[in-house]
Amino acid sequence: MNQPIVLIGAGKVGLATAKMLYSRGIRLEAVLFSSGICQSQDMIHEWVVSGKRPTLIIPYHIRQLSQDFPDAIVLDCSGADWDESDWMILLDSGIKAVFCNKSLLGSESSSIFLHPRFKKSVRYEATVSAGLPVIELLQRQLDSGDKITRIRASLSGTMAWLFSELSLGQKFSQALPKAMSFGYTEPDPRDDLSLEDFVRKIRILSRHCGFTETKVQFPKLLPNKAMQQSLPEFLKSLPDYDEAFLKTVSCDTGFCSALVGEIGPDTARLLVESLELQSDFGRIKGCNNLLVIHSHQYDSDPLKISGPGAGVERTAAAVFGDLMMFLSKNHVPSVYLWSGAQLSEPQSVTAYAPASIGNLSCGFDVLGLAVSGLGDTVQACFVGSEGVQLLEITGDQGMLPTSAEKNTVGIVADYLLKRSSHKNRGIGIRLHKGLPLNSGLGSSGASAAAAALAVGALLGDLCKEDYLNACLEAESFVSGRHADNVAASLLGGVIAVTSVDPLNVISIPVSPRVKIGLIQISMEVPTKEARARIPSKFDQKATIANLGSEASLLSSFISENETDLQRGLKDYLVEPFRASMIPALKVLKPAFEDLGLTLCISGAGPTLFFMSYDELKISSALQRTRDIAAAKGIDLQTRICNVDTRGTRVVSAKV
């Protein structure tokens, strides 16, 4: 399975990183903004495209990542001052981290470098010199057995650019706004001007090289007043500091000023030096960085790394590079459904689609939810003859049709093939059923969704709307023209189908804290038979009550209000007509009511489900369910699940 990728920080670098990921077909599972988390793929996509921040986000603490995304790669492009203990917990949970943010690794008291998982689970190229390969080169030296003895470095592209501009006659109050507009500074330029940003880089370099000195000596360029002002006040008063900065860079003819850091086994300092114009550091122009690295192997003739050390795109590229180093060579990123991005000429693609709960109790044919831990897998490959061939089906006990024209995966493949530029090619399909048939967990929908992404990724010139319409076509053939299951499986999370003709689907924000209890009854309920039980007209009172349930349910997904959640799961329209088809529902429902929980039919049944923000309450309810089942002779299985926010994803590809 792919590792989910979570981005922290929605500033310039965070947005540039997200754009870079999506341009390469890599989907973010979640973005942590300053005020909370967003897991809605539609909202994340809107932010990436337009830069407009989502309005519906959920308060969130980064420690929750250890439960919600225990195998994630987290990209920290924020400027947050983290509590180190939070990151210790995340690393212990198996999370990997790519840091652009220097606050944690570069703090004076940081001990995270000593964490047992640090070397294998943390990358931080972007913390030192934007896109320059500083950490990578140093690590190669250390891995070879070389020992670093001393590093002299100009590591602030911002300060190098400012010093260069000031030496050309620009005033400080003119140069700083330019640097900000070019993306050369931190969001608050005083992080650069205070030299704390440079100091953090020195600490990171020192720790990476195995040096222990972290009390960095450095000059003071700004008066206390500047640091105490609000950012708007500081920017307004920039002319007040022109004279002080002019003195800082004033030098004799043939010399210039440069801000140089120096580290060694017992040295960590930063100072303004007067240097000859023709010296290595005197020749630095613009936002360039320079590192002069002395080691046992490179002593009299040291290594030198030089190049631009600032810029949003360069920094984002370093983050992306570290991410790619984490991803194994066999990893294929989830294809981004909205872009039509394709893999590099794949010959076969395998995709996984999660189970789903259709109708979502009160949301008949409208609301669907993807469920973690259960699903179907489809492999699509090019074959010699034209058209679609169903090569193999496993896990279905021989119950599914083997004809491509009558199987959902074949119908999906045929639909997409006819709408691609590869109409004359042949596609072979292999389906592995991980879901039981007629179980109420969107079995046909999961097969269709997995086929849509596998075939779509193989063909490479299709989009989200094509995938959804292909799945709807397949569902119409099998169980009726409804998209709540297939859309949930395909897109992940909670979805609402606002229209079928034309098809329109939106993603609904849902708290990651919600847990789902599943009760799988050992019987079958054919979807067509269950739909036949539903009358063509509904009672007005029941309809109004159901609308109230839907409003309560959707509200609870954001507010995390348990009372609203249980009220919202009550179905006054469809359940009364289907309940008799699942005798276990009547037996179990009173026990759930005693616990303050609402037991519901999943899809057409016979699987039952309930939801809560209290995992202990869910565990207690499932234990009571097993006790009742044992006493009444009901054959069933139980499990606790999360909402699968990832949806259908590519799990492997061969090129």
Image (spheres, rainbow, N blue to C red):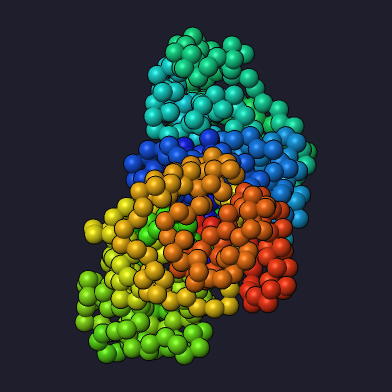
Q: In this view, does 452 lie above or below 126?
A: below
| Total marks placed | 0
Q: In this view, does 351 lie above or below 561?
A: below
Instruction: Where is residue 95? Give x, y as percent.
Output: 64, 55
Which image quadrant is residue 22 in?
bottom left
Foreground residue, 278 or 523? Answer: 523
Instruction: Where is residue 327? Give x, y as percent.
Output: 54, 63
Foreground residue, 412 or 401? Answer: 401
Which quadrant, please, contains the N terminus? bottom right
Which quadrant, please, contains the C terminus? bottom left
Which image quadrant is residue 170 in?
top left
Foreground residue, 654 or 428? Answer: 428
Residue beneath the point at 50% across and 88% down = 397
Instruction: Where is residue 517? Give x, y as percent.
Output: 61, 61
Instruction: Where is residue 498? Give x, y as percent.
Output: 32, 52
Which image quadrant is residue 201 in?
top right
Whether residue 343 sits left or right of residue 257 in the image: it is left
Q: In this view, does 355 lie above or below 46?
A: below
Q: Is residue 55 visible?
A: yes
Foreground residue, 8 or 374? Answer: 374
Residue beneath the point at 66% across and 45% down = 63
Whether residue 471 sits left or right of residue 642 in the image: it is left
Whether residue 41 sits left or right of residue 293 in the image: it is left
Residue beneath the point at 32% across and 74% down = 474
Residue beneath the point at 38% across and 50% down = 543
Q: Is residue 3 visible?
A: no
Q: Is residue 559 above or below residue 496?
A: above
